[in-house]
Image: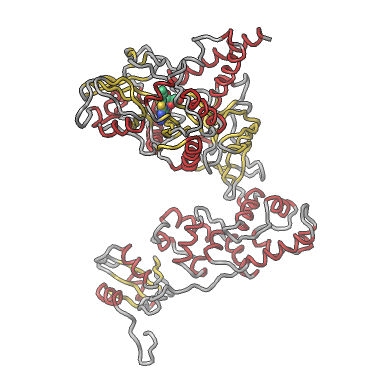
Amino acid sequence: MSKNALQKIFQLRELLEYHNYRYYVLDDPEIPDAGYDRLIRELSALEAEFPQYQSDDSPTRKVGGYAAKTFSEVEHAVPMRSLGNAFTEEAVVNFDRRVRELLDLGEGKMEYVAEPKLDGLAVSLTYENGWLVQAATRGDGRTGENITQNVRKVLGKATRLQGERIPAVLEARGEVFMRTDDFEAFNRSQKKAGQKTFVNPRNAAAGSLRQLDPGVTAARPLSIYCHGLGHVSDRQPPPTHRESMEWLRALGLPVSDRMKTVEGVEGCLGYYRELLGQREELPFHVDGVVYKVSRIDWQDRLGFTARAPRWAIAHKFPAQEEMTRVKKIEVQVGRTGAITPVARLKPVFVGGATVSNATLHNREEIARLDVRVGDCVIVRRAGEVIPEVVSVVLSRRKKGARAFAYPETCPVCRSPVVYERGGVIARCSGGLFCDAQKKESIRHFASRKAMDIGGLGEKLVEQLVDNRLIRDVAGLYTLTPEQLAGLAGMAEKSAGNLVGAIEKSKSTTLARFLYALGIPLVGEVTAEVLAGRLPDLEKISHPDEEELQCIPGVGPIVARSVSTFFDQPHNQAVIEKLKAAGVRWPAPQTPSGVTDSFFSGKTVVLTGTLGMPRSEARNRLQSLGARVTGSISKNTDYLIAGRDAGSKAGRAQQLGVEILDESRFLEHLGRPPEKGPDGVSA
Ligand code: IVH
């Protein structure tokens, strides 16, 4: 047994050395932190069981990093250690108990300082007489790399300490990191420039800081927070960690303002839960929280183990990245025919849920990842975001794994796949002929924020389409309880309930109806806007693209999508069928105060140059209840003609449309309608 254990110990050490090298030297880790932590724990457990095989060389004892040979070396005056990890609340309880036992404090509550654990790169900053003289990475904890020039820009004004009573030598320790928004913008610009992108902010920060050319670092969006003190001369440092940090802040160094003093385990766990709840909103990646015994004299009494202080611990957040295997790659056909490749995964627990599918987005993403069936991949699930494949662990790729080929025909209806946006987006050309698109459009139509037909789930829609009971969304309104009762999972009562829900959905709002139609690019908000601005479906059915464009929040691309949708005879036919089935919404309400305006309910066309921008004229007319269109027809009430009015004026004359010049237009903008003797608007 112990021979096997020894073999396993050596294997694990070798593996961990490899991963340390990738993480610390190449800034290109191959496995997620959670996977690394598991390997460390496995090795620690074996070393604890077989103490005869312990060694100071083991990755469980060393801090992990390396001083790269390319930078000059710096010896740390006080070693830079790592932190012990707690993955459970129980581990935090044990940590606290041990602290109190070692200090012989009995049952009294310990005061801790709780801080975010930033996911960045540890640095040491040495100031002499207030000037930054040296900055170093942690390296192996004893010797680091001299990155003084690289850190200057990150520190900005803080290369010089402020205030009085600055000690002759002061070493501050902290974390260099990249804020999430900076990371995203940086990766975008790297991609645009055809340069290396990074898998996460931590690697981007490390890769940016450890650049031999400090000019490159200076151009990268790095930030820093200090979280501790190293060597300090001639001045007694403050008696608590919190005061030390406040002192650093007073000296002009950046310190996290999320640091909090807490009491006992309950205080620690309360802080943990609070920060975990805010995790997605924080402006930087945080992989846990750190609890530190507040009193420095107690920290000194507790001291260090080989690797970490006994007075502090990192309480890790649940991993958002995990490793698993790709079983299959399939393509899904969406409501508008968009073809999305999806990785079917060996289920893995990540970010608080079991994940067995991850989107591969599009062709570009597949090419970037080069993910293949059988690959070992890193999967990320953060907050409400759909799980994604972050990268492929290439060293574990099996021989003969074949690159994924995009389909040329739709896997559902066999129609040709067409490529848009330079080949990035693939779309099934089958339209509503494609069952997949049909099903998706019906599901969308029935969804809660659309027509809200409760009880019409995915399985049922599948059966309705597969059994040819309905051909489009309008078909829903022809279903009978008898037809439904024959379907799998449908009892007589539920069939009756569903028909009731379908009936009830007929009474809706225009915004919901527009959203339910599934017009590409028209989400709930746009549907609301459209319904508010064009409250009459007759007009929406033949919307004027130019008019649509002028609605705030619509714009040319959405306007084009809306008018293309309504131009399709098959869409018109479905709308007609829905109306005939009795789908209805309350009549439009004229905005209050608008009924009285000269322009209310009138159709107006603008032409020529006006004193105010065209868009303003349009908005003002619309706010007075007018409908502003782009071309003159017999339905037009007024043509407003500015200077240099062109052909539209001629056409207005032909059709007998009244022309208002600019001064009359302005008059009417500010004036209520003229009243005839009977009080009716003229
Ligand atoms: S205190 C003696 N506080 O996490 C060790 N470290 O996993 C003192 N880190 O090496 C470390 N945020 O680079 C401390 N608020 C924080 C931290 C923090 C991030 C890093 C630090 C450390 C590593 C350990």
Residue 434 horizontal/vertical position (percent): 65, 49
Q: Nearer the viewer, residue 375 or 534?
A: 375
413 lies left or right of 379: right
- Which residue is more in the foreground, 21 or 131? 131
Do we see residue 366 in this rendering? no
Residue 573 percent coordinates (x, y): 61, 64
Quarter of the image with the N terminus is top right
Residue 55 place in picture, x, y as percent: 52, 9
Residue at image position (76%, 59%) is: 484
Q: Is residue 51 above or below residue 346?
A: above
- 628 displayed left or right of 44: left
Number of numbered discs overlaid on the protein picture: 0
Residue at the location (47% across, 73% down)? 589
438 relative to 509 in the view: left or right: right
Quadrant where the C terminus sits is bottom left
Query: Which picture quadrant has residue 144?
Result: top left
Q: Residue at x 49, y 10 (%)?
A: 56
Q: Which residue appears farthest toward the bottom when viewing the image?
A: 677
State which image quarter holds ligand 1: top left
| Whether residue 233 can be seen here | yes
Image location (x, y in percent) of residue 200: 45, 31
- Find residue 410 and report its image quarter: top right
* Front one among 85 and 632: 85
